[in-house]
Amino acid sequence: MESRCGIKVIDGLVEGNFTGGQKELELANTKSDGWFFYSASKKKSLEKQALYLPRAPEQGLVRMLSGPEFDGIGEGTASKIVSLGCINVLQCLEDDTLKLSEALLVSEKIELSLRKGWNEQRELWPLKLLLMELEFSNASIRFILDELGSEIIEILIQRPYSLIGLVTRLSFEEVQSIVARLNLDIDPKDKIISGIHFCLHRVEIQRGHTAAPVKRIRKDLEAQFEIDDNDFERALNALDNQLILTEHDEIPFIQTKQTFERDQEIATRVSSIIKNSKSLISSKAGQDYADLPSGIRLSDEQKNVLRLALNTPVSVITGGPGTGKTSIVLALLKALEDLGKSITICAPTGRAAKRLAETQGMKKYKPSTIHMMLARNLKSVDVLVIDEASMIDADLMLMVCNVLNEKSRLVLIGDADQLPPVKSGQVFRDFIQSGQIPVGRLTKIFRQQSGSDIISAAQSVISGEFPRSGDGLTAKDFSFLEEGDELNLEQLVIDLYLRKLPRQLGVDPIDDIQILSPMRKGIVGIDNLNEKIQSLLHGGNKPLVNRKFGPSLYKGDKIIQTKNNYEKGIMNGDTGFVAGRKKDNFQLVFDGKNVDFSYEDLNSIQLAYAMSIHKSQGSEYQAVIIPISKHHQHMLGRNLLYTAITRGRERVAIAGDRRTLDAGIKTEWRDFRYSLLGHWLSKNIGD
């Protein structure tokens, strides 16, 4: 990649031409005073092919000379050097015969640093100077030098907004600032189209949307710059082939081409299965299978759901906690097995897959994570059953589709009221909302026949109502303890974790109790609670390891794995504890299994006395503590709280600010996502 460029400077009678050692480069026919940056791709360039700065790039030169390439030169020294004049400084640096200590009034040590840094970057410095003056980040500069080189000059002149999405972490606002600085004349239409790209990318990353109404996109753009109606209409009529306009429910939506093609592939594959598959059994035979397997009694509702799953090629089973989803899965697997079908059962996370394997009667079906199933490079599967399917994002569903052919069968099982996936999309909800895929709904509560306060609380929250609760001192399994002061709340949460709940339930807090906090920062955030609990448990002891990044670890610490490690068989979300150290290895225990970790392996380990609600998805705990602070208000939503509450089996204690909790319960929009997958499923299957 050609990363060299030239600089021509005209300042009254003074003229300079700096080419990074390429004397043959030339910029012709320049008339104005100023600084011209031109590409080295041609020996002779014209003024219109150069980027023009009316003033010297003093800020960029200071930034460059105070960078890591020039050892020992800080911003103060660099500023003094540049005060001698940018042209003068560049001419001195270009002249290898000059003694810089005299010419630039610096020490001999600084002279050596200037010479060394300059000569190592001699061909690159003209372009780096431009990029630094335009305030590109260091990461963006590295990308541009490696991937674009001096082509960046042409891009900035002709299509600057195309850099959004091309250059890592370059925002629309930053490009706007660069365009203004260079006084570039850009067609508003092109600016709007680039803005649409940026908005769609941002809402997908930040909010999980995979499409957006045109009206919403325009509102976001108008927060950045003024938009003329005619220009916006021109932009919509001239969308590039990377943007797709679609009308859904008489509302115009827009998607990126990548998202559109992903939705189309999923919808097409599912439609193909539905249109080409036949029922496994007749409706009459389905009745015979409804009482299987032996030892499990199914309600009439569950029997209907089982028949639906057996008689339809693609189906969804949804139900809240305690509605018998596990019984349905067991009955379904046994019925499919008796029919001679080859069954693959998996879940999105390692913890959820292990919960399946730990369920009586399920282990023989060898549940795994979706990623482990995909890693087997199966050409196709016969029957695929996915539990905790509400956690499946759009990209993961696309990968799942690769193992489905038109004779495959697919059953998605989950809770539609839980949080949407961490990544973009909402596949489970889209399948349900399409209206084209049969949905079996489990509504009858079976867990704890005498009545579960946890389940009642979860149902209240998802309905937008404040839950009834005990006071935390009685045997009721759900309680809300009001505490508005954060320091008092911190102490209350720690006391519940280490003393009150262990005494009430007769359990070990490390093994059986989990704190779920909505945020990482703050007094009752994940980081601080982990630090305080660790200090109370291990204060005064010598740590097994002091880590450069992350807290020290002590013997007995509760920990969580944050990345899938297939080699060790430890999945993202698995919790365990630190057992000891043997020479350079550390012994960690997960589900009773000792696993050796190197120091580098510990980078994926965090403390887990407290963890995020998102990390808890797919897991259940004997008791759960949920702190609610006033600072959590911008994070809380109905689905988040519902998910947290439904992680607890025997006891759930929410502690904190009542008004903040009530506001979170009433906030339904926070987990809402725009998606067109349901629309495309409806069109593909319905046609």
Image (cartoon, helix red, strand yellow):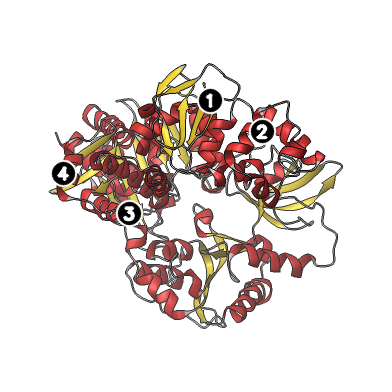
Residue 472 lies, with reference to residue 416, above or below; the image says: below
Within 10 Å of disc 1 (Cα), the crowding (few <14, some 14-19, many 20+) is: many
Which disc, if any, is residue 651?
none
Which of pointers 1 and 4 lies earlier in the amino acid sequence?
Answer: 1
Camera-nearest residue between 46 and 438: 46
Q: Nearer the viewer, mark 3 or mark 1?
A: 1
User: Mark 4 is on which residue type?
Assistant: Glu
Residue displayed at 64% across by 67% down: 529
Q: Nearer the viewer, mark 4 or mark 2?
A: 2
Q: Which residue is mark 4?
A: 233
Q: Which residue is mark 2?
A: 92
User: Mark 1 is on which residue type?
Assistant: Ser
Within 10 Å of disc 2 (Cα), the crowding (few <14, some 14-19, many 20+) is: some
Q: Which residue is mark 1?
A: 3
Q: Give the left or right position of residue 246, taking residue 377 as reference.
A: left
Q: Position of residue 393 (x, y in %)?
A: 40, 43
Residue 30 lies, with reference to residue 595, above or below; the image says: above
Residue displayed at 49% across by 75% down: 630
Which disc, if any, is residue 224?
3
User: Mark 3 is on which residue type?
Assistant: Gln
* Mark 3 and mark 4: Cα distance apart in space: 18 Å
Residue 231 lies, with reference to residue 483, above or below; the image says: above
Q: Nearer the viewer, mark 3 or mark 2?
A: 2
Which of pointers 3 and 4 lies earlier in the amino acid sequence?
Answer: 3
Q: Which structural element holds mark 2?
A: helix
* Mark 3 and mark 2: Cα distance apart in space: 43 Å
Callout 3 touching callout 1 (CB < 8 Å): no
* Mark 1 and mark 2: Cα distance apart in space: 22 Å
Q: Position of residue 165 (x, y in %)?
A: 41, 38
